[in-house]
C-alpha cells in the first residue's frame, strides 16, 4: 500500500519533471497542468493522491478511462470537489452517466457522439468541455479520428450548442523512438494551431493539448502540451493490458 508520503514525493517529482521540461522548451511551467489518470485505482488511493496534491498546493485534474469507474468513484470523492475528465472511449448509451460527473470529455472522435453529448447537456442547461481525440500514430490499437479529418470534425463540433471545444487529445505512438513520438505530438500542435487560426465559430477556445503520459511527458511538453496525463508515475505500475490514455 502506498503511503501518503510516497504520493507527495511522487507528485513533487512529476511536477518537477513538468517544470524542467517546460523551462527547457522556453515555456511557463504554469501553463501545463497535471491530470491524474486513476484507472483501476480504488477511491482511497485517489483520495490520498488528491490530498497530497493539496499539501503541495498543486492543482490537478482527475481522469478516468472507463465510465463505470468514474460513476463508482466520483460520489466517494465528491467532498474534495475534483475536476473530472473522461479520457477513455464513450459509448452513446453512457453519455448521461458521464455527464453526471465529468466536467470534460477528451475522447470525442465522431460528430455523432458530439451531437449526443450536446443534446444531453442542453437538456440539463449546462455546457460541457470536449476535446477531439486524434490518432496521430495511425495505430489500430488507438482510438481517435485521422489527422486528415480532424480539423473538419473540430469545426463541426465547435459549432454545436451546449458544448465547448477546448482542444485536442492524443496518445503518443507506442515506440521507443523518441523522434516518432515527438513527431506525433507536433502533428497535434499544428492541427490545434490551424483550427484556432481558422476563425471558425467556436474554435477560439480550442487551445488545449492533452498529450503526454508518464513515459513521454517531456516530449509532449516540448511540443506544447497543456495537460499531461500521469498515472503510473504517481500510482505505480499497473498489470499489463491494452494501451490506455495515460
Image (tube, rainbow, N blue to C red):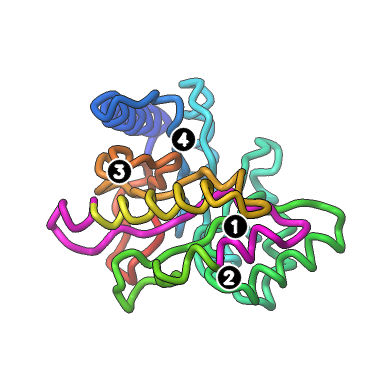
Magenta stretch in the rendered image: 153-182
Give the labeled residue for mark 1: 105
Q: Which of these two is toward me, 71 or 121?
A: 121
Number of residues whose C-alpha sits closer than 10 Å to that of mark 3, classed few (under 14), some (14–19) or many (20 or more): many
Circle 1 Cα neighbour tier, 10 Å, few/some/many (<14 / 14–19 / ≥20): many
Q: Residue at x 71, y 56 (%)?
A: 163
Q: Is residue 188 above or below residue 111?
A: above
Q: Residues within 10 Å of mark 2 (few under 14, many from 20)?
A: some
What is the distance, in whole Å, between disc 1 and disc 2 at their CAs? 9 Å
Provide residue 48's location: percent of width, then percent of height: 50, 36
**Residue at label 4?**
33
Q: Position of residue 222 (x, y in %)?
A: 28, 38
Q: Residue 107: where, in percent of width, then height?
A: 53, 63
Q: Is residue 124 left or right of residue 171?
A: right
Look at the numbered discs 1 and 2 and tell me whether their residues touch, using CB distance below 8 Å: yes
Q: Residue furthest front?
A: 198
Q: Earlier in the sequence, mark 2 or mark 3?
A: 2
- Reading the image, the residue beneath label 3 is 217
Query: Is label 3 in a helix, a strand or a loop?
Result: helix
Amino acid at each position: 500500500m502506498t503511503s501518503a508520503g510516497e504520493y507527495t514525493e511522487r507528485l513533487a517529482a512529476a511536477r518537477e519533471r513538468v517544470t524542467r521540461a517546460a523551462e527547457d522548451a522556453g515555456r511557463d511551467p504554469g501553463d501545463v497542468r497535471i491530470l491524474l489518470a486513476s484507472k483501476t485505482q480504488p477511491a482511497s488511493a485517489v483520495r490520498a493522491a488528491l490530498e497530497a496534491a493539496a499539501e503541495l498546493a498543486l492543482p490537478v485534474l482527475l481522469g478516468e478511462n472507463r465510465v463505470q469507474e468514474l460513476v463508482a468513484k466520483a460520489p466517494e470523492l465528491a467532498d474534495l470537489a475534483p475536476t473530472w475528465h473522461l479520457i477513455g472511449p464513450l459509448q452513446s448509451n453512457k453519455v448521461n452517466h458521464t455527464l453526471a460527473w465529468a466536467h470534460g470529455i477528451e475522447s470525442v472522435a465522431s460528430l455523432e457522439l458530439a451531437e449526443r453529448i450536446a443534446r444531453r447537456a442542453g437538456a440539463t442547461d449546462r455546457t460541457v468541455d470536449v476535446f477531439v481525440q486524434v490518432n496521430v500514430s495511425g495505430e489500430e490499437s488507438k482510438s481517435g479520428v485521422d489527422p486528415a479529418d480532424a480539423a473538419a470534425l473540430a469545426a463541426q463540433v465547435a459549432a454545436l450548442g451546449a458544448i465547448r471545444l477546448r482542444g485536442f487529445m492524443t496518445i503518443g505512438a507506442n515506440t521507443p523512438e523518441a523522434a516518432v513520438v515527438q513527431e506525433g505530438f507536433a502533428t497535434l500542435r499544428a492541427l490545434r494551431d490551424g483550427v484556432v487560426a481558422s476563425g471558425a465559430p467556436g474554435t477560439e477556445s480550442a487551445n488545449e493539448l492533452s498529450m503526454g503520459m508518464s513515459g513521454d511527458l517531456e516530449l509532449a511538453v516540448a511540443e506544447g502540451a497543456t495537460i499531461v496525463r500521469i498515472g503510473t508515475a504517481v500510482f505505480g505500475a499497473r498489470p499489463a493490458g491494452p494501451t490506455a490514455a495515460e
